[in-house]
Image (spheres, grey):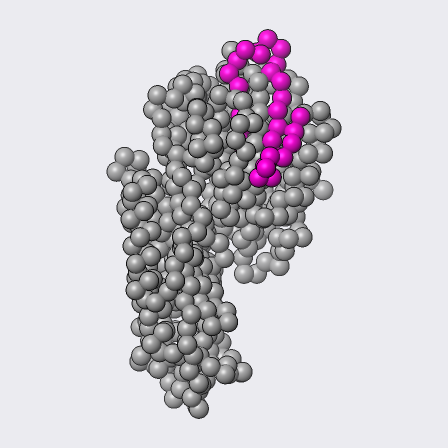
């Protein structure tokens, strides 16, 4: 039964609901792409996959608009798979359970995937339409955006003919985005020695969960708790006093999401058992008060474990690891002096995983300025190298430099004022829109980005405002009409 059948524009919502019924985390987009292709076959729109696996579309101009500039619509099909601790959702097999709450569409216990499913839905409705006026039209639905922008990074060159790119992946209706941050992943690996478990030891698992999390670009300046950072703080404070031995440290799931959960397993002498539980209780009160405004769902639980491990990390290694984790920034290091409320440079301490004598850590840096990003990356490389880790620079992507002389920008601003009798806000975004990478492949494109209002992307609280989707859709239709003259 359709949940969104009463919403307008129904063409957008029904398409989004169909997209949401098929699992599509990054790297598992094939079923969704095949569904889109079947719809395109049905309406006779030309389509193909490029060398990277992106879905490309081409549609002739409306009658009389053949000489208009070519327009390319662009969105990504994949979504970030995040869920609450209570959810049993399986992102590899289950469709999303959509809900309507107080003027917003959300999902039950999971990310919604409006980032960027609404954009894909809009592209499909435009390509299938017979009554929307437009010039020569192309569309690109990219893959694997959320995991590393690999679809855009490997976009086939020389196949797109359009002059203008409309990216439909921004998240504030009434704002036109003209630039975005670049970013880089850092893969950090510690190999560690272990020591034998001394007699008379007890084992605890300490779990921190329920933090708000969110997009590591858009929410990095909001002061939300990072579960890895918070547990590092507890360990550093109590390790010597309570003679804690670290067995494992795991937390976070994605480089572009703020770590919502983390778990440590520690051993300690039985004589310190009561002091340990008291320390956990005191720390819970401390961090609950500190993060109440941003992370009201925070929980910290200590659970006694029955089976002792054979070995644990040495004290020397544990201290080096924790010092590096506590010293590693996971926040906005500088706000933009020219774009109000936007981070300029940030780092997200995203993932930690313990396995087979190794501790693996992932960080993601972002910056609107290439030199600042390079400096941030080098500082983190130096920090973890001094702590004894091997650091590899992983996936990186270019930013999108604003063009104040953009002709499509001027047309977009004029149209917004005509339609809504107010000025659209111009903005840059501290996130990795694909425009920068597409601009590298097609340097002559004139580009802007706009979209509906989406809140708390990359977290289970993600939602999209219903009214804003109608405004976004109307604006897109009118924009295509304006550019067709």
Q: Residue 316, image x and y in percent?
A: 33, 76
90, above or below 145, in the image: below
Magenta span: 46-74
Q: Is residue 64 magenta?
A: yes
Q: Residue furthest bottom?
A: 199
Count of numbered labels shown in the rendering: 0
Visible in this render: residue 219?
A: no
Q: Residue 333, image x and y in percent?
A: 29, 49
The residue sitting at 44% across, 85% down in the picture is 196
Q: Is residue 468 left or right of residue 50?
A: left
**The N terminus, quarter of image:** top right
The residue sitting at 60% across, 16% down in the picture is 61
Quadrant for residue 189, please give it: bottom left
Q: Is residue 377 magenta?
A: no
Q: Is residue 99 left or right of residue 468?
A: right
Q: Is residue 116 left or right of residue 298?
A: right
Q: Residue 133, image x and y in percent?
A: 58, 16
Visible in this render: residue 26?
A: yes
Q: Residue furthest top?
A: 64
166, above or below 229, in the image: above
333, above or below 321, in the image: above
Q: Residue 297, image x and y in percent?
A: 45, 59
Q: Residue furthest right?
A: 42
The residue sitting at 62% across, 10% down in the picture is 63
> In the depicted view, which residue is nearer to us: 342 or 325?
325
């Amino acid at each position: 039964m359709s949940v969104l059948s009463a919403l307008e524009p129904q063409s957008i919502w029904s398409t989004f609901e169909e997209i949401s019924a098929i699992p599509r985390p990054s790297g598992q987009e094939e079923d969704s792409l095949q569904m889109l292709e079947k719809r395109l076959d049905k309406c006779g729109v030309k389509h193909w996959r490029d060398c990277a696996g992106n879905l490309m579309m081409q549609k002739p101009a409306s009658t009389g608009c053949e000489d208009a500039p070519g327009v390319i619509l662009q969105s990504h099909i994949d979504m970030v798979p995040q869920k609450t601790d209570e959810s049993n959702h399986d992102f590899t097999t289950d469709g999303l359970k959509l809900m309507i709450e107080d003027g917003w569409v959300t999902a039950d216990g999971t990310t919604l995937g409006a980032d960027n499913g609404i954009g894909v839905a809009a592209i499909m409705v435009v390509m299938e339409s017979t009554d929307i006026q437009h010039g020569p039209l192309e569309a690109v639905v990219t893959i694997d955006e959320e995991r590393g922008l690999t679809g855009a990074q490997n976009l086939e060159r020389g196949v797109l003919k359009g002059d203008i790119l409309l990216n439909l992946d921004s998240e504030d209706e009434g704002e036109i985005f003209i630039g975005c941050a670049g970013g880089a992943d850092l893969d950090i690996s510690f190999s560690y020695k272990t020591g034998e478990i001394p007699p008379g030891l007890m084992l605890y698992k300490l779990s921190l969960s329920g933090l708000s999390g969110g997009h590591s670009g858009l929410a990095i300046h909001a002061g939300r708790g990072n579960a890895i950072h918070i547990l590092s703080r507890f360990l550093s404070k109590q390790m010597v006093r309570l003679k804690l031995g670290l067995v494992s440290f795991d937390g976070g799931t994605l480089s572009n999401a703020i770590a919502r959960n983390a778990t440590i397993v520690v051993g300690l002498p039985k004589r310190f058992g009561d002091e340990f539980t008291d320390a956990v209780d005191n720390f819970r009160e401390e961090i609950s008060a500190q993060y109440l405004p941003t992370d009201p769902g925070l929980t910290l639980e200590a659970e006694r474990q029955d089976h002792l491990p054979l070995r644990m990390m040495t004290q020397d290694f544990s201290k080096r690891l924790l010092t590096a984790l506590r010293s590693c920034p996971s926040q906005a290091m500088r706000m933009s002096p020219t774009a109000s409320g936007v981070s300029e440079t940030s780092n997200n301490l995203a993932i930690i995983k313990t396995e087979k004598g190794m501790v693996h850590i992932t960080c993601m840096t972002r910056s609107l300025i290439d030199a600042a990003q390079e400096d941030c990356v080098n500082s983190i490389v130096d920090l973890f190298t001094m702590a004894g880790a091997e650091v590899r620079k992983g996936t990186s992507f270019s930013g999108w430099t604003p063009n104040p002389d953009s002709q499509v920008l001027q047309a977009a601003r004029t149209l917004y004022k005509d339609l809504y009798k107010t000025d659209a806000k111009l903005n840059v975004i501290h996130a990795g829109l694909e425009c920068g990478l597409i601009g590298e492949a097609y340097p002559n494109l004139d580009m802007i980005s706009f979209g509906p209002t989406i809140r708390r992307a990359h977290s289970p609280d993600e939602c999209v405002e219903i009214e804003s989707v109608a405004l976004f859709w109307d604006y897109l239709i009118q924009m295509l009409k304006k550019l067709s003259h």
